[in-house]
Image (cartoon, coloured by chain):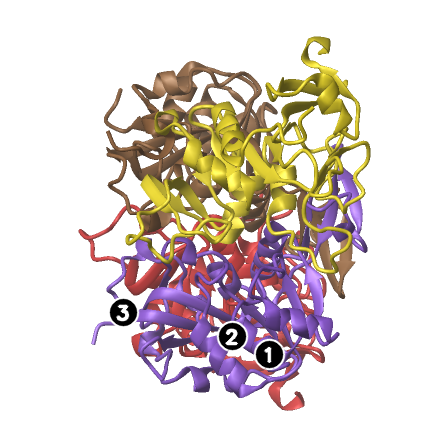
Chain colours: A brown, B purple, C red, D yellow
Amino acid sequence: MAQTVGGGRNKLWSSARLAVADISDGAVVLVGGFGDVGVPFRLLDALAAHTARGLTVVSNNCGTGERGLAALFKAGLVSKACASFPSQSGNHHFKAAFDRGEVELELIPQGTLAERIRCAGAGLGGFYTRTGFGTELADGHQTREINGVRYILELPLRGDVALISADVADEAGNLRFRRSARNFNPVMAMAAGLTIVQVNRIIPVGALDPDDVHLPGVFVDRLVELTSP
Amino acid sequence: MAQTVGGGRNKLWSSARLAVADISDGAVVLVGGFGDVGVPFRLLDALAAHTARGLTVVSNNCGTGERGLAALFKAGLVSKACASFPSQSGNHHFKAAFDRGEVELELIPQGTLAERIRCAGAGLGGFYTRTGFGTELADGHQTREINGVRYILELPLRGDVALISADVADEAGNLRFRRSARNFNPVMAMAAGLTIVQVNRIIPVGALDPDDVHLPGVFVDRLVELTSP
Amino acid sequence: MSPKAGWALDEIAARIARDLEPGSCVNLGIGMPIRVGAHLDPAAGVILTSENGLIGIGPPPEPNRHDPDVIDAGKGPVTLLPGASVLDHADAFALIRGGRLDVGVLGAFQVSQRGDLASWRRPTEPLGSVGGAMDIAVGARKRYAVMMHCDKSGEPKIVQYCTYPLTAPRCVNRIYTDMAVIDVTEQGLVVREIHPGLSLADLRAVTGASLLPLAAN
Amino acid sequence: MSPKAGWALDEIAARIARDLEPGSCVNLGIGMPIRVGAHLDPAAGVILTSENGLIGIGPPPEPNRHDPDVIDAGKGPVTLLPGASVLDHADAFALIRGGRLDVGVLGAFQVSQRGDLASWRRPTEPLGSVGGAMDIAVGARKRYAVMMHCDKSGEPKIVQYCTYPLTAPRCVNRIYTDMAVIDVTEQGLVVREIHPGLSLADLRAVTGASLLPLAAN
C-alpha cells in the first residue's frame, strides 16, 4: 500500500452517538453554522440525546425550531451561550431557557466572535479591535489607543470540542465545505482540543488535490458520515 | 452578456513595468514568496528598473543571486527590510547594502511576520503572542501576562503595495496558488492598499468554482500575466 | 405636511442602489438594506458581499432553483454570479474590517446628529442581536444607515443623542429614510434630498436634531 | 574517552525518528532536523509539516521528478503524500502555535540546563536568521533540540546559562546530540541514553551543566 498522510489511521466513527459520547459535563462546545446552513445537526441531536450538562455553547445563533442547538436548550443542557445573533424568530427554546435564568448569554459581535475563535486556534493571547469600542458590549473590556485609534482587548475563545459540518472529507480528515456552509466551521475546527465533523460524503485518501483542501485533516479527529446512524 | 462579479472591469495590465510604475518613493512593499518559491520575480524586476527609492520591503527572505529582491538591494532602492530569514547563502546584495549601512533590518519571527501582516489585513490593532518573549527580539515590545502566560504585543504590518505571485487568476482577479507557492501571498494581498499580482495564467470569469478560489478578487487590483512583457 | 408623505421601501432601496459606485464592494445588512440588491444596475458591477462569506452575490434565485447552501446575512436564499468566491467567517470579517469593503449599508433604530448608530437592541428588550453590525460600522469605508424617518409611534429616529444602546459612535456617513437623504458632516446634518411632498420645515418637524439645507454645506 | 566517539548525523536522525509517535504531527527545522524525515517508518504515519504551509510531506523526489513549487522549510525539494494539504503562512503558524503540532524538532547552538534554547544568531554575527524557530519553540507541544554535543572548538553546547541570544526560554524537552539523548526535567538534565563508546563521566567532561543518570529520575 502506498504511504499516505497519517498512515491510514481511521478517523471514521460509526455513529454520531458514539462520536460525541465522551463530551463531558461543563464542556465548551464550538458549534459551526450560520442560521441553518453548515450546522452539524446530526452531531447536535446526538449530543442532546447524550445529555452532557452545563455546556457552554459557542455558535453564531442559538437555534430555531426543535432540532440542533434548540434541542440542547430544550433539554436544559446549556448553561452559557456565546453568540452574535441569539434573538431570531423560532428561537423559543433558547428564549425560554434564558427567561428561566438557566442560560447566561455572552453577546459577541460576529466578527469578534469569529476572530476570538481564530485567535485561540492560532495560539495567540488576545487582540485589539475597534469593534464594540464605545458600546455596552465593551463593558469590562480593557481599552487602549494605538496610533490614535481606540481599541478594545478581546481574548481567545477556545473550545474543548468543536462540532462542525463539512461537505466532503477524505479518510485523512481533509475537508471541503460548500458555499456559505463554510462559515465558522474551519476556524472552529482549528480552535478545539477535539474536532468532530459531520460530513456528507467520505472519499478515499488521495482523491483531493492538496490545493483543493479547505481544512487540513490535522485539525480533524473524528468523522461521522451523514448516512451513518 | 451575463452579469459577472465586478461587472467585467478589466484588472489586466499589459506589462509589469506599467503595473508597478506608480509605486512611489518610500512605499512599504509587501513581497510574497518563501525562498524562491511564490516570489513575484517579474514584478520585482520591473520595480528595480522603475527605481522608486527608499522602499521598505516586507518579505520572508532578502533575496539571493541577482534577481528579485536582490536586484532591489543591488540598485540601492531599499532603506528598510522586514524579514525573518535574511542571512542565507547567495544574499550578497542584501548583505552588502546592510554592511554599507544603507538598509535597516527589522528581524521578525516568521509566524509573527505572517500574523502581523494578517492583523493589518484583518483591520485589527495588534495581538499578543508568546513568540519572542524573553528574547532580544522582544526588546522594545510591551509585555503582558494573561491567565498566567506571558505575551508580547505585536502591531499590524500594512503595505502600501503588495507584490504577489499566483498560479491562476480569472479576469475578476480571483486567485489560485500552487503548493508551497501559496505561502505569504494571500495574507499579503489582503493587507495592502494596492495589490499587484503576477500570474502564470489568466482564465475567463466563471471558470473557477467559488469554492475553489483561494483568494477572492476583491483583494486584487492589478493582474500581470507572466507571458506579457 | 401629509403624515404619509414618503418613499416606499423599494424606492429607498433604489435610491441607495443609485449611490453605490460601479465596481465597489458593498455589504447589505439584514432588513431594509438587503432590499438594495434587487435595485442594482447589473452593468455597474457592484460587488455584493455578506458577512457569512459570500462575495459576488447575484439576484434572488428562481423559485425552484434555490441552493440551500447559498444564503445571505439575512439567511435568505441568494445566487452567486460568475466570478463569485467564498471566505470563512474569520476572513469574511477581515474583508469587512480590513479596508476593502467600500460601503456598509446598515439598518438603524436611531442615528444621532454626530453619526452615532443604534441598531442592535431596543432598550425595552433584554436580548439584543448584534450580528455583524458593530464590525461593519467600524470597518466599512463608508457607512450608510437606512431606516424609517420616525418610529411606529411617530417619534423621530434622527436624534441629538441616541437613547438606544450604540452599535458604534460617530460612524454613519449618510442616512436614508422614507422622507430624506441626509449627510452627517462635521458641520452637522445636511439634507441632500427631501421627498417632493415635504418641505424642509416638514422634515424638521419630525427630526430630533438640527438639519442644515444642502446650500449651507 | 575517544574524542571522536559519537553517532553520525544519520544515526541521530534515525534515533529521533524512532521517538516520534505514530500519527503525530511534526515540524522538522532547517539543518539537522530535516534529515529525520528520511528515517521515518512509513507505516508509522508521522505527519510531517513545514512552516511554509505543507502538510503531509513525503520522501525526497526522484531526481527528475522534482516539483519546483514543493519545497520544505529548508527550501529543499520534497514530495507530498496522498492526503497532503496546503496552508497559507498565517494558517501554517496557527497550526504551529495553536496546539495541533505535537513535536517541533529544532536545531540548536546552545541549550541550557533549564531548557533555554539558543539557535538563531551567534554572538559574533551581526545578522541572525530566526525563521520560524521562535514560533515552533513556544508553539509545539514538545520541543526536541538537536545539535552536536560540542562546537567545532570543542566547547560544550549544553550549558548552565546560554551565552548566545535566546530563541525561547525554558522550551526544550529533550536534547539529541551525537553523544547522548538528554531530557530536560524539573530536576535537571537527565541522561536517557549515551553513545556506547562513552561513559557518563566522559559525557560530563564535555557538558557544561550537571547531568543526572536516568536512574536518578
> Residue B105 at x, y = what percent?
70, 65
Say which label, 3 or 1, has the lower sequence index. Answer: 1
Q: Which mark is residue B74?
A: 1
- Residue at point 27%, 29% (across, down): A226
> Residue D85 at x, y = what percent?
37, 44
Badge 2 is on which residue?
B66
Q: Are marks 1 and 2 in contact (CB under 8 Å)?
A: yes
Residue C206 placement: quadrant: bottom right
- B196 lies left or right of A108: left
**Badge 1 element:** helix
**Badge 3 element:** loop
Q: What residue type is labelled 2?
A: Glu
Q: Which mark is residue B205?
A: 3
- A132 lies left or right of A198: right
- Residue at point 79%, 27% (across, down): D209
Say which label, 1 or 2, has the lower sequence index. Answer: 2
